Amino acid sequence: MRKEFKTIAESQVTISELMLPSHSNFNGKIHGGYVLSLLDQIAFACASKHSEVYCVTASVDTVDFLNPIEIGELVTMKASVNFVGSSSMLIGIRVEAENIQTGKVKHCNSSYFTMVAKDSDGKSIKVPGLILKTSDDIRRFAKSIKRYDNKKMRRQEFHETDFVSEEHLHIVETYNVKIEQ
Ligand SMILES: CC(C)(COP(=O)(O)OP(=O)(O)OC[C@H]1O[C@@H](n2cnc3c(N)ncnc32)[C@H](O)[C@@H]1OP(=O)(O)O)[C@@H](O)C(=O)NCCC(=O)NCCS
C-alpha cells in the first residue's frame, strides 16, 4: 500500500559515471546531449521511486550548463523531488564533475524536470505528498510553486485558438523581424 506522504530522502537518487571519449563532441568536451540523456534517466528514477508507478517526462526546465565537463572526469548527479502537485513532480538535479587525479570538484549543471505519474492505462494519477523537514526543503518547495504556477500560466498564454496577432504586432515589430503577412 502506497504511503500518503513520503520524505524527500526516500526517493533521492545519486549516480556517478566516468566520462569516456565516446561521449565527447568535436571540442573534446562532453556532449550536452549526453548529459541531458543521463539527466532524464535520473529524473525518471527519482520520480518513479517517489510515485511508485511509471512516470513520463512532461517538461525540462532551465538546464543551465555552468561549466564544461572534460573526458576522464567523474560525473555525479544527485536528484531529489523538490515539489509535488497532484500528478506531477518537479525533480531538481545537481551535476558535479570531479577531476579524479586532483580531487577538484566543479558544479557543472543544475536542472529541473517535471515528471508525471501514470497508471497502467496511461492516465495521470495522484502522487504521494512530500514531507518537508528542513528550511531548505521548504525553500525549494516554495520556489517550485512559482515555477509550477508560471508553467501553468505559460501553457494557457498564447494559445493558438485565442491569439489575436494584431494585439502583439507593436511589440513584435520592435525585434529583428520584417512582417510580410
Ligand atoms: C505531459 C503529459 C503527461 C500531460 O498530461 P495531460 O493529461 O495532458 O495533462 P494534465 O492537464 O492532466 O496534467 C497532468 C499534470 O501534468 C502537468 N503538466 C502538463 N503539461 C505540462 C508541461 N508541459 N510542463 C509541466 N507540467 C505539465 C500538469 O500541471 C499536471 O500536474 P498536476 O497534476 O500536478 O497539477 C502528457 O502530455 C504526455 O503524456 N506527454 C508525453 C510525455 C512523454 O512521452 N515524454 C517523453 C518524451 S520523449
Image: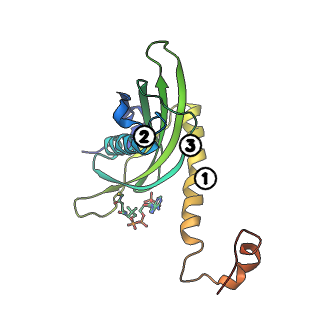
Residue position for label 1 = 146
User: Farthest residue in the front direction?
Assistant: 26
Q: Looking at the image, which residue is at 44% across and 42% down?
A: 130
Q: Amino acid at mark 3?
A: Asp
Instruction: Give the percent coordinates (x, y) of residue 17.
Output: 35, 28
Assign ligand 1 to one image quadrant: bottom left
The quadrant of the image that shows the N terminus is: top left
Counting from the top left corner in percent of width and height, residue 61 is at 52, 51
List the residue tagged with mark 3: 64
Can you tell which of label 3 and label 1 is closer to the viewer?
A: 3
The residue indicated by pointer 2 is 35
> Disc 3 versus disc 2: distance between alpha carbons?
11 Å
Q: Relative to residue 36, is residue 143 drawn left or right?
A: right
Classify mark 3: helix, strand or loop. Answer: strand
Q: Amino acid at mark 1?
A: Lys
* Image position of 112 (left or right of 179): left
Task: State the image coordinates of residue 9 (x, y, percent, origin top left).
Answer: 41, 31
Answer left or right for 154 relative to 37. right
Q: CA distance from mark 3 to mark 1?
A: 18 Å
Report the amino acid beneath label 2: Val
Whole-Å distance between the Cαs marked 2 and 1? 26 Å
49 relative to 21, above or below: below
**Residue displayed at 47% across by 34% down:** 29
Mark 2–mark 1 contact, CB under 8 Å?
no
Residue 88 image offset from top left, x and y in percent? 42, 54
Disc nearer the start of the sequence (3/2): 2
- Circle 2 SS class: helix
User: Could you say which disc has been placed on residue 120 in the image?
Assistant: none
Front label number (2 vs 1): 2
Q: First in sequence: mark 3 or mark 1? A: 3
Pointer 3: residues within 10 angstroms few (<14), some, or many (20+)?
Answer: few
